[in-house]
Amino acid sequence: MRAHSLTIDRRRLFRGAAVLTLAGLLAFAVGAQSAQGQATAPAKPFSAQVEKRAAEMRKKMTLEEKVGQLVQFPNGGTRGPDGKGIDQNELLARGGVGSLMSPSDASAVNAFQKQAVEKSRMKIPVIVGTDVIHGFRTIFPVPLGLSASWNPDLVEKTSRVAAVEATSEGIRWTFSPMVDIARDARWGRIMEGAGEDPYLGAQFAAAAVRGYQGKDLSDPTSMIACAKHFVGYGGAESGRDYNLVDMSERTLRDVYLPPFQAAADAGAGSFMSAFSSLQGVPASANHHTLTDILRGEWGFRGFVVSDWDSVNELINHGVALDGETAARKAVTAGVDMDMGSGRYGENLVKLVRSGKVPERVVDEAVERILRVKIAMGLFEHPYTDETRRQTVLFAPEHVALARRAAVESFVLLKNDPIAGGAPALPIAEGKTVALIGPLADNAGEMLGVWECRGRDSDVITLRQSLADRLKDKLIYAKGTEIETDSEAGFSGALEAANRADVVVMALGETRRMTGEAASRTKLVLPGNQLKLLQAVAATGKPVVLVLFSGRPLALPWEAAHIPSILEAWYPGDQAGPALASTLFGETNPAGKLTVSFPRAVGQEPLYYSIMNTGRPVNPGNPYVTRYIDELTTAQFPFGWGLSYTKFDYSATKITTTAARAKDLNTTGAITIEATITNSGARPGEEIAQLYIRERGTSVVRPVRELKGYQKILLKVGESRLVKFTLTKKELSFWNIDSKQTVEPCELTVWVAPHSDGGQPAQITIAP
Ligand code: BGC
């Protein structure tokens, strides 16, 4: 097997970022626009002038220069796209590369750019990209955590801040957002997306694109988004990363494509083709998805970059025997830029010269890339202002947003009364608190993975925040490591618990247990953390479990025995302050799950919007769809999340009197409403969710599908009427004739606090 010609540790390079001082930070306005009520931009973000200029420029290029534009090369790579030892400056100067990955800082970017712009014949600037996933220097919660806010406006803001920071170091392109639907908690990359639902996923996809790209691509703070991994990657069989994906065209259309289409509609400048195969065709050689759907049906005018080495990996998939065939298949399917494999650089010139790849294919790919570079204003302003980073990186406003984002990401999974009295949360003032666990004071873990230029030293841990607040009323004991068998710390933990009024346990996964190549078959607390938790719970002290994870975990003992559980994900820089304010009730948790938490790993893939079977669950009848040793339901369902206050839902009311498929397929709508009341003792935010089910249709439809939600703030005793509208967008699906259409059916709707609640209402959709 041929060694990977460009293999370098990209993440290590990236972590070698310049050290910058926080002194002299200036006030900086985030300037993100509200997501509410914003119309999505058209799928074609380029003006006629941009299109024309790209075409004219392409006509002046030699074949070698055109192929150069299709090559992405990692900064620091030692062998070039043609497989030979490389002088990076020489490569840039001869126009042999269109994009660079992960340079160290703005001055490095400017030095590379100088070669491209001043030395190369065509003077085409390089586009510099890296993985800015949940913040650049200021680190926000991991994407799955951010999605638990059900607040796309928040993600638009965090993405805007990430863009403002990253562009100050010359990064004008991010390989984000990951908009893969993920329904299997074993898959480590579930952490990188917005969860299991296509409706919600589409909202977050569009919001991230708006945030990264800003209002105008030519603004120096605009960063091109990259919707990834196109497509189906999250459906990896067995939840094992990189594994094959096999699904029907219907599931692809109804579930996996909508967030990508939303990203394209929001104007995403680029897409990334996945590692995985779909229905036997590797994503990086899939003409149907990359060309027929993305360009043909959606009108996408940006460019597609392969995932890392995935062009070369066509050989491993077995659809190419050599690099030449791999390059030919990828480029003709619609992969415009080759990330890191070198196969385009090595082969495309000769493939065109020998007539095996029509030059038109290369021309189209080049124009797509040039369009983006032109729209970004790179030709006019190729260089990065090296002074801006001093005022924007880790600016106080960004840090404040990180705190707010962390607060919004927390999900209160459980908060039972203790011995018939008040629940342990929020913790009353004056109590002595024992803080126990390996994640209570671990700065690095709080950042999650893809931490970009985040620094451990920027993080405030839960221990630091509680120590500030509680002084000598805090007793800290680490208790154990995340992954160990040693019980050496148990006695200290028990002693701390015994001296306290309430115990906060900070337990969970290491951050490296999620992300790429981090699939798990066990969804339990690693090491001996459960044993420690059980020992502490046996003291009889009220226990609050703060759970850090990048995925749903299956925690049956914990769910049954621990009265209060708060899912904190990986909260980012402001983990401590955000958690402390939540634990003490200054902020009221309002997040809701965007992924189902299983009871047992054997239930995976587990998601709420399943298709009914011919034998639905029916207690008392053994010959139905079920397990003989476990329930089929989630431990904590999609949409679940509690508050320190209480919300009551009225019956769901359909306010439309008659509905016809004919009208709904054009401009018709069905309107729905319900009243929500804060009947508890604190103000709080509630996420009211609209679910539908269609029966009597040409194909089986899910038992429930999310089709709307509203996050509302209610004062104590306040009631609010929430209204929803269903149109073709929400009611149509890929029917038996392979048409996206609304069919006559019996429609059930619920306005509900989660995917397993609410009162149904019905209406017939007549033909
Ligand atoms: C990942 C992508 C990422 C790329 C570049 C790949 O291994 O799958 O999500 O954008 O590397 O770092």
Image (cartoon, rainbow, N blue to C red):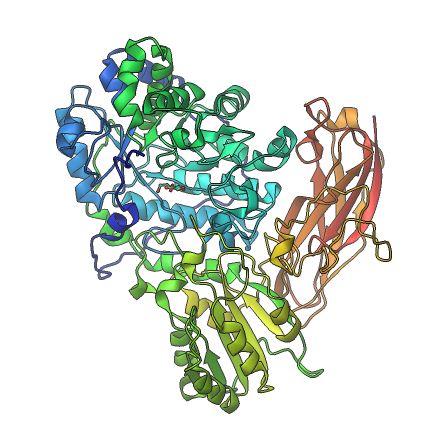
Relative placement, left or right, of 111 versus 174 is left
- On the image, which quarter does residue 163 sit in? top left
At horizontal 34% and vertical 19% (from top left) the residue drawn is 367
Quarter of the picture holding the C terminus: top right
Q: Is residue 291 above or below residue 144?
A: above
Relative placement, left or right, of 104 versus 523 is left
Q: Is residue 227 above or below residue 352?
A: below
Could you tell me residue 232's position as x and y percent?
A: 53, 36
Could you tell me residue 567's position as x and y percent?
A: 54, 64
At horizontal 27% and vertical 18% (from top left) the residue drawn is 66
- On the image, which quarter does residue 488 sit in? bottom left
Ligand 1 sits in quadrant:
top left
Q: Is residue 415 above or below residue 476?
A: above
Relative placement, left or right, of 98 versus 50 is left
Q: Observer-nearest residue: 480 or 177?
A: 480
Relative placement, left or right, of 247 versus 406 is right
Could you tell me residue 422's position as x and y percent?
A: 66, 80
